[in-house]
Amino acid sequence: MAIVENQDLRAYCEDVAKKAKAASAQLAVVTGKQKNDWLRKSAAVLREQTETILAANAKDVAAAPGFGLTDAQTDRLRLDADRIDAIASGMEEVAMLADPIGEVIESNIRPNGLRVSRVRVPLGVVFFIYESRPNVTADAAAICVKSGNAVILRGGKEAAHSSAAIVDLIREVAVQFGLPADAVQLVGTLDREAVGHFLKMSEYIDLAIPRGGEGLIRRVAAEATMPVIKHFHGNCHVYIDGDTDIPMALDIAVNSKCQRMGVCNAAESILIHQEMAAKVLPELAARLAEFDVEIRGDKATQGHVSTAKPVTEEDYATEFLGPVVSIRVVDSLQQAIDHINQYGSGHTDAIVTRELANANQFTSQVDSAAVMVNASTRFNDGAEFGLGAEIGISTDRFHARGPCGLRELTSYKFIAEGQGQIK
């Protein structure tokens, strides 16, 4: 798939969207076996064509400094044989998942003999806008097509050549197994205005999924004329309750914050019951210091941690995505819950406690997509939750919430079967 610039950008985008819509209709009659065969063969071809993909990736890596990528961002962009093998393994893992399409969610027979079933069906066409990592290209294609959806991929310019090489290969394989090639399309222009055109095409596109910075996500949410699966940011919390196992609480708090800081399910704030402050804070500060984490705390926290800087209201609401954490000592479980619901982003929040009643109150009152009890926030992930794979995490309440896997890219229809009943 060549990377091109188009004079008539809207016409180009409409052509892509129309092809995706036609492909989605063809996917409706593709069997689960065909989709799985495509996934497995695509994985094999990606491995076979490692050198082709690496040559394309080398162009992206060479251009990275011009795009202002940091060393860490360039490393995430760079592919090698092992990373390509991991991409292929990801497609094989999706092939092993149960096909959601055609699943009978519920069925009943009415008094007049009419059988009414609710059956899972694809959403149709997904427009996926995402960051520069080329592995996401294959992941998104696999998840969308396995769930019966055509996908329009708008990847970052930083990985344009790598993504194009991957998409070219898996499109060729699709035709071999009776899938429409246009079930997977990579937008062939780097013009940012293309995104705006696609977001206006609700007659062809059924769902938009932005995955990247908050600015991109807010733009998509504001401009989209179709539903959007999204989360703006992940301001996640760990609350250490008044009756808790201290070593476990420390392990969970440190893992939630430090295991990987630049991700949406990393903890950004730690709340500690006042009864535990003196017992927990000194050791917690020492363990966070091992990761060079700066503590911004309230006065109670500063009383136990001499290196803590004064916290602000803005800090409580901030997703740091790095070595900074806000800490507050609270008077009660309810104050912790109120704090989370006020400052949190509805993404992932955890309680560490021995008290079942407190855990139940926390899970009932904390309004987040995922609420963890005695476990790290880092477990809010499609694979960790048993979905096998995910295309993103949603903090919305309608249709999909939390990690979005195959089933979250489906809807349902009612099928009524009779023997001549009339009303």
Image (cartoon, rainbow, N blue to C red):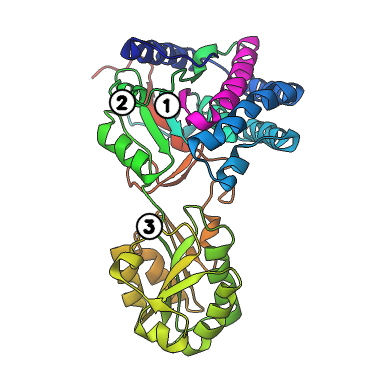
Q: Amino acid at mark 1?
A: Val
The answer to if 164 sits in the magenta stretch is: yes
Which residue is identified by label 1?
Answer: 126
Q: Which residues are magenta?
A: 149-177
Q: Amino acid at mark 2?
A: Gly
Residue 300: horizontal and vertical position, in percent?
Answer: 38, 86
* Crowd around label 1: few <14 · some 14–19 · many ≥20 (10 Å): many
Q: Nearer the viewer, mark 3 or mark 2?
A: 2
The secondary structure making up most of the magenta span is helix
Comes first in the chain, label 3 or label 2: 2
Which residue is identified by label 2?
Answer: 196
Foreground: 82 or 77? 77
Please identify the quarter of the rendering in which residue 121 is found: top left
Residue 143: horizontal and vertical position, in percent?
Answer: 54, 31
Camera sees residue 112: yes
Comes first in the chain, label 2 or label 1: 1
Which residue is identified by label 3?
Answer: 368
> The N terminus is located in which quarter?
top right
C-alpha distance separating marks 3 and 1: 25 Å
- Along the horizontal axis of the image, is 158 left or right of 234? right
Q: Amino acid at mark 3?
A: Ser
C-alpha distance separating marks 2 and 1: 15 Å
